[in-house]
Amino acid sequence: MENKTIVKLTRNCYWHIESSNLLLNGQEAKLTASQKKLLGLMVKNINKPVLNVNIFFEVWENLNKEYNEKSVRNLISSIRKAVPIISIINLYGGSYILRQVSSEPNYEFKDYSFEILDQSKNAIVITNPNIDDNPIIYINGSFTNLFGYLAEDVVGKNCRFMHKNDNDQLSLEELRLSLRNEIPITVNLRNYAKNNQLICTEVTVSPILDKNSGKLKYFLGIYTDVIMLQTLVKQIKERI
């Protein structure tokens, strides 16, 4: 299709700009007005990050509605469920990207991978070592629950900021060495929450490699509250 009013998103999936309709296998997909507004904005910025606040005011601009990040997440989730072949990811924490792809990988997992991370009971952080100082690009809700930090507090920062001035930790050097060598590691670290509360955590960091080139793409960090776990074990033993 050479028509400039039609944008190919993936095989057999097209967005019609003039009518704001999504064509899937030659048929018009059933979408709500909000879903169409969202897709229209994402297509305009295809393969580029769009801030969730911009999405919010594009979709709900005439409703005099107070900004709510959860509303955007729910709308994104509804699109993923309605049209799972479309690739929308929130790799930048506070942003979403509509990917234009030429082939279909395993969408059953891919399109819901970030929903899986968001719903994980473990605190999860993703960093990008290909950007200077390996900054955080994603945290899930459990990370916020454990440490109190929101995405806007941490995205763009290196994880070391959570150590505050408590840098005399032997595990930190082990962690740095594993990052340099791109190997997984599990260490115990003293981190500090947004309210400066000390939280002793077991941290597992794993390198995420590009499956085609084998090059390092991201680091995945999983945090477990050691004190909370020790307290739970103690309570169980006392009841036995």
Image (cartoon, helix red, strand yellow):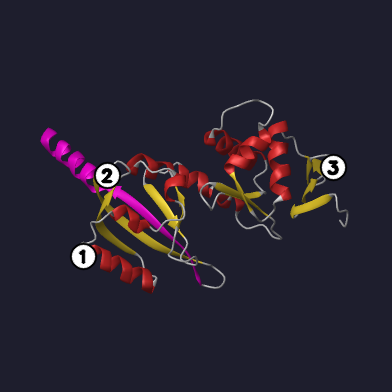
In the rendered view of the protein, which quadrant contains the C terminus? top left
Residue matched to label 1 = 170
Crowding around mark 1 (Cα neighbors within 10 Å: few <14, some 14 to 19, many 20+) is few
In magenta, the rendered stretch is: 215-240
For the residue labelled by badge 1, is the local secondary structure a helix, a strand or a loop?
helix
Extreme-front residue of the structure = 165
Whether residue 55 can be seen here: yes
| Between discs 2 and 1, the one toward the N terminus | 1
Q: Percent position (x, y) of residue 69?
A: 53, 36
Q: Amino acid at mark 3?
A: Glu
Whether residue 81 can be seen here: no
Residue 18 is tagged as: 3
Which residue is painted at 76% across and 39% down in the image? 29
Residue matched to label 2 = 196
Residue 67 sits in which quadrant?
A: top right
Cα distance in 3D space between marks 3 and 1:
60 Å
In the rendered view of the protein, which quadrant contains the N terminus? bottom right
Closest to the observer: 80 or 68?
68
Is the residue 130 above or below the residue 127 in the image?
below
Q: Percent position (x, y) of residue 119?
A: 45, 41
Query: Of circles 2 and 3, which is in front?
Result: 2
